[in-house]
Amino acid sequence: MRTEFENYLASQTDLPGETIRHISSMATVRRLHKNEVLMNAGEICRHKVFISDGLLRTYHIKPDGNEHILHFSPQHTWTLDVESYDNLTPSLVNIEAVERSTVLLWAKPDFDKLLKDIPELKKFSERLISRTVYNNRNRILTILSGTPEERYADFVNAHPDYLTRLPLRMIAAYLGISLKTLTRIRHAQLQRGARSMVK
């Protein structure tokens, strides 16, 4: 799994192999079972997390028990609760494995030192943050202005492989719609597809 990360970082940066191996050596490997929690709300996020394989989700549970999924983190992406990690405050979100996953964890003091010692890694990290901010902004705009049908269409276009990896309730919680609404949208699409095949 370290090699998986090393290949990823080599493809994303111009860092020399020795530096990449050093970054990799500072991480600990953790294997997660399906539905295993990596971090609970109320805990302090103390690690940068890289997903070597699998799929994680970050979500918040409202007082009424409803879930809001903020984002999914597939293979070769990073995840954490930024506010909790930066400020060392209790997290408002949970991070959990949707399927069997393997992650690399860097303790905050270790990763902070890596960023300080390796300017190229710091630049790469800043690019990732900018990309995340951009993606989150687009997602918020879609949630605020898009119809349920438009939200689902955007989701399918952006993440076609998720349809076979996620239960419908999680897709609905991510899109901010009810499971009933999502089922109706999918049923209508299947009917349209069937009619077009007949023609």
Image (spheres, helix red, strand yellow):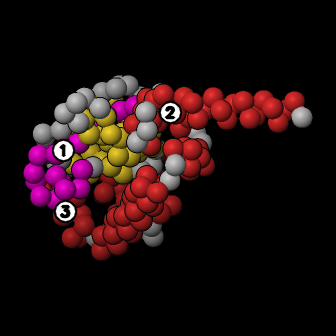
Question: How far apart are the alpha carbons under marks 1 and 2?
Answer: 27 Å
The quarter of the image holding the C terminus is top right
User: If you read the primary sequence from the N terminus, does the residue marked by circle 3 or circle 1 appear first?
Assistant: 1
Range of residues picked out in magenta:
81-98
Q: Please indicate whether residue 195 sits to the left or right of residue 179 in the image.
A: right
Q: Please indicate whether residue 54 sits to the left or right of residue 44 in the image.
A: right
Label 3: which secondary element = helix
Taking the spot 42% from the left edge, 55% from the top edge, the residue there is 144
Look at mark 2 in the image and give the residue it sits on.
181
Provide residue 15's location: percent of width, then percent of height.
41, 68
**Picture quarter containing residue 99?**
top left
Vertically, is 118 above or below 49?
below
Q: Which mark is residue 92?
A: 1
Q: Please indicate whether residue 198 sits to the left or right of residue 181 in the image.
A: right
Q: Amino acid at mark 2?
A: Thr
Q: Is residue 93 magenta?
A: yes
Provide residue 6's location: percent of width, then percent of height.
42, 53
Label 2: which secondary element = helix
Q: Which mark is residue 112?
A: 3
Provide residue 140's location: percent of width, then percent of height.
40, 57
- Whether residue 40 appears in this view of the structure is no
Label 1: which secondary element = loop
Taking the spot 54% from the left edge, 28% from the top edge, the residue there is 183
- Whether residue 12 appears in this view of the structure is yes
Q: Amino acid at mark 3?
A: Asp
Q: Amino acid at mark 1?
A: Leu
